[in-house]
Image: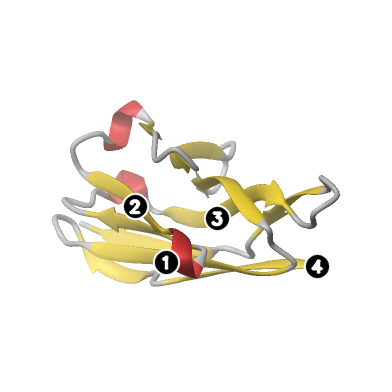
Amino acid sequence: QVQVVESGGGLVQAGGSLRLSCEASGNIVSIEYMGWYRQAPGKQRELVASITSGANTDYVDSVKGRFTISRDSAENTVYLQMDSLKPEDTAVYYCKVEGRSNDWGDRFGSWGRGTQVTVSS
């Protein structure tokens, strides 16, 4: 009913930059929350950055000062600008979107399929 698609991943050398995009589509009345998560081999999935409908943002300590999350409400899109990348940032990055799907108060929570980010030293 709601689809989430990430893009922008790839290969980059340490110190470089990437910009990830996440677009939600389908039966969407409003979006309340959008977040970027990542999962590296052998590790648990962790929250990287999130943004609410009120534009409040949160970041995991390891990316503060390097990553920036932003949104375009008109296009149901969220971005993650990643600067000064480190090999430790290598992971599959997933986008999660939560909100309302109709006028009767039904909610949705949808995940994208992920995009690979690889940082070489």
Q: Dot 1, crowdedness within 10 Å: few (<14), some or many (≥20)?
A: many
Question: Of the residues under marks 2 and 4, which one precedes in the sequence?
Answer: 4
Residue at 36%, 62% in the rendered image: 118
Residue at label 4?
1
Disc 3 and disc 2: Cα gap in Å? 15 Å
Residue 96: where, in percent of width, then height? 60, 51
Please identify, in this view, whether the residue under mark 3 or under mark 2 is nearer the observer.
Answer: 2
Q: Mark 3 points at which residue?
A: 94
Q: Cβ–Cβ below 8 Å for labels 2 and 1?
A: no
Asked if the residues shown at circle 3 and circle 2 are in contact, with their CB atoms under 8 angstroms apart, the answer is no
Give left or right: position of 110 versus 97: right
* Disc 4/disc 1 C-alpha distance (Å): 20 Å
Task: Please state which of residues 70 and 93 is positioned toward the viewer in this rendering.
Answer: 70
Write down the residue under mark 2: 70
Nearer to us: label 4 or label 1: 4
Q: What residue type is labelled 1?
A: Ser
Residue type at the position of mark 3: Tyr
- The answer to which of 3 and 71 lies nearer the viewer is 71
Q: Residue 51 carries which label?
A: none
Which label was assigned to residue 21? 1
How far apart are the two marked residues, 4 and 3, measured between alpha carbons?
18 Å
Quarter of the image with the C terminus is bottom left
Q: Are marks 1 and 3 in contact (CB under 8 Å)?
A: no
Residue 53: image location, x then y, percent: 49, 42
Q: Earlier in the sequence, mark 4 or mark 3?
A: 4
State how far apart marks 2 and 4 are (Cα).
Answer: 24 Å
User: Mark 3 packing: few (<14 Cα in 10 Å), some, or many (20+)?
Assistant: many
Q: Earlier in the sequence, mark 4 or mark 1?
A: 4
2 or 1: tag closer to the N-terminus: 1
